[in-house]
Amino acid sequence: MDAQACAAANADVWRAKADAAAIDSGCGDAFVSACADSGAGTDMTADKLQYVLDNRNVDAKVVMLTATHGHDDAWSRVYGGAWGPRREAVEVGVDLLGRAVYATLDFDEQVSNETYGEFRLVYGPDSSTLVLPHNSAQHYASTDGVLDEDAVCGDLAWWSSRGDLAVAERATEAASVPQSGWAHLVGGEQDDFDLIETISAGPLAATAVVAVRVRDSVAATAVDGFFTAQALGEAPTVLEAVFSTLLTDPELGPNVERITP
Amino acid sequence: MTITVLARAQSGEVFFTRDDSPASGPRYYLHRRYAPGDPVEISLARVEHAIATQGYDVVDRDFATWAEVECFIDETMPRITTADANDMINPASAPQAIGQMRKWLADDNKRQLITPLVTRYLRVPDVQADGILMGELADLLDAADTRHAPIPRIAEGSSDRVAMFRSFFAFRATA
């Protein structure tokens, strides 16, 4: 499967679907604009943020885990177990095995979903980033690792079509929820684990990170813990230390956004 | 009562437990170490999904009480070394530290931490070279007004205090 060719072929289709959905749903121009301006965001834990700070890039989960757990354990965690074969099938299908950096679409002020770490990194992916209307491993691959290539090819979108895809997929629901709910609707993981997913080829340079968001309550606790440990001559926890390093990082520090939900 | 720590993020900020005590059946919780509030009850499916997709460390250890769980997490929270932490005492983090210490002024328990932390910053040569930082740190020492402050107060003029700190630490360095 040539993923880029599939996405190219679908650009006009997503545009037509978006136009129809916007009219039928009455979701409004504000929603259409927000989708068109969306970024790509991914939640991460402090240990993975540590990797980003040390290596100056955002990389595939298996690459980041290899740094701390070694190659075999990392590959077992990502491509073993109940979920692994599905993920592997998708990545082989789009020719990004071991290199895929997953994210969701991102609206301003969106914070992490709490389950996958306290930090949300938002980056401006390059034009080769692919977008799918579903959680790829869950929706397009069977539990034994067989990919429905026709379905993937029929749904793939280019980054430049992300707004069209989001409107086509979510306009109906957007029309019935307040604007404050759009970020979760478009960029969040739904109760059935589905989401609009972006897939980029890692590694992405740290300079591509346009925001690192953390809840203000978490940031305040981390800063307090870090400096308390310092005053007592003790070692801070990883999150405390990473957050402190992040704030003083010349590239990423200015992009830290403390969000009060 | 049995509580099982199922899995955790390597850095420890998120972990999952199962509580087997309710008669209605086991309950599953998401714990966030750095967030206010109680653990959040979540479904088993979400726990399994999080473990499967995030590469979390599987723990699978049983405890009799929540206090034991807390103790286990505290003791096993990964920490960076004290030596690395010392390296992080740098001028770039001083503004954050000063902001934090100003908050500590209103807290009787934290107030006593101000002098040791200020002292650590004052030993950094690049901090000593920054008159504004030195003045702010000196103001904090004054405001903390702890019994341990070894330096006499100077009535007015932060520039005087900066000069005094410089001479004080120059003396310490050669003592």
Image: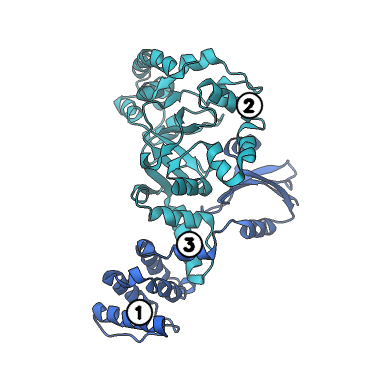
* Element assignment for label 3: helix
Between circles 2 and 3, the one closer to the viewer is: 2
Packing grade of label 2 (10 A; few <14, some 14-19, many >=20) is many
Q: Residue under label 1, please give it.
A: B142
Q: Which chain is cyan?
A: A
Residue at the spot 60% in from the left edge and 56% down from the top edge = B77
Residue at the spot 38% in from the left edge and 56% down from the top edge = A248
Q: Amino acid at mark 2?
A: Pro
What's the CA distance linking mark 1 and mark 3? 23 Å
On residue A85, which mark appears? 2
Q: Is residue A19 left or right of residue B57?
A: left
Location of residue A61 with respect to B22 vertically, above or below: above
Residue B106 % position (x, y): 41, 71
- Find out whether the residues at labels 1 and 2 contact each other: C-beta distance under 8 Å: no
Q: Which chain is home to disc 2?
A: A
Residue at the spot 73% in from the left edge and 46% down from the top edge = B20
Q: Which chain is home to disc 3?
A: A
Q: Can residue A88 be spotted in the picture?
A: yes
